Amino acid sequence: YDLKTKESEYFSKRLSALVGIGINYIRQLISDGKFLWIAHQGGISRFNPKTEDIKTFILNLKDESGGIINFIASDIEIVRPDLFLIATDNGLVRFNPESGDYQQYLPKNDGSSIFTKDIISIKKGPKGNYWLGSYGSLMRMTILADDHLSFQTFYYDRDDPYSLGNTRVISLEATEADIWVGTEDGLYKYSTILDRFEKIAHDICTSKSIMAIAECYIIL
């Protein structure tokens, strides 16, 4: 949709012909200022709005046994021109669009890697950390000085009234000191100052799932 001309154009057939199966199920769109990056059921693609050219990047992600599998990309976060973070249902992917190189992160059960492979959302938060939402957990990722990634996991603890609920994290939003977490069981707020979660009660409608969060709006 063009805000100046107030005209819209539908690209579905054109994109499908170029990208293949999966482009009709778009999970995320994000611009780097020149290209529009698309996370979809077939992976990730780069669309040039001026030339209408599109390129799909082939990422041969592996499962725990080492076999190559198909994946769904659900979110993209641009850290810098040579570092994209991609949330997929088969781990976190670190991707360099300039070289095409990528690195896949899978759970290793060593306390320092991602907690689960099904990553749904990514959001930059306070102090330069990045937050990853998944099924039953929220992860805080830090980019270290040597450019390696460090992970800390927050998950449900029935003995801790200030823990995250036992539910799927669908959406994330960050403010100056808080991380807002949209889940299938409602809205949570994590205070980076108090280091605890609080469930936010609402009676707007019967749906508990928080599909998206903006600065002033919550989409149920």
Image (cartoon, rainbow, N blue to C red):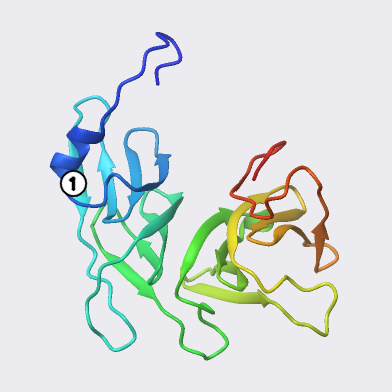
Q: Which residue is mark 1?
A: 19
> Most extreme residue toward the front, as rendered?
206
1 left or right, relative to 144: left
Asked if residue 7 is positioned above or below residue 125 in the image, the reply reads above
73 left or right, relative to 59: right
Q: Position of residue 139 (x, y in %)?
A: 60, 70
Q: Position of residue 148 (x, y in %)?
A: 47, 72
Of residues 170 and 121, the one nearer the viewer is 170
Q: Which quadrant: the N terminus? A: top left
Of residues 120 and 113, the one nearer the viewer is 120
Q: Position of residue 67 (x, y in %)?
A: 23, 83
**Residue plotted at (38% across, 64% down):** 94
Asked if residue 30 is positioned above or below residue 50 in the image, the reply reads below
Crowd rating for badge 1 (residues with CA inside 10 Å; few <14, some 14–19, many 20+): some
**Residue plotted at (27% across, 46% down):** 23
What amino acid is at disc 1?
Val
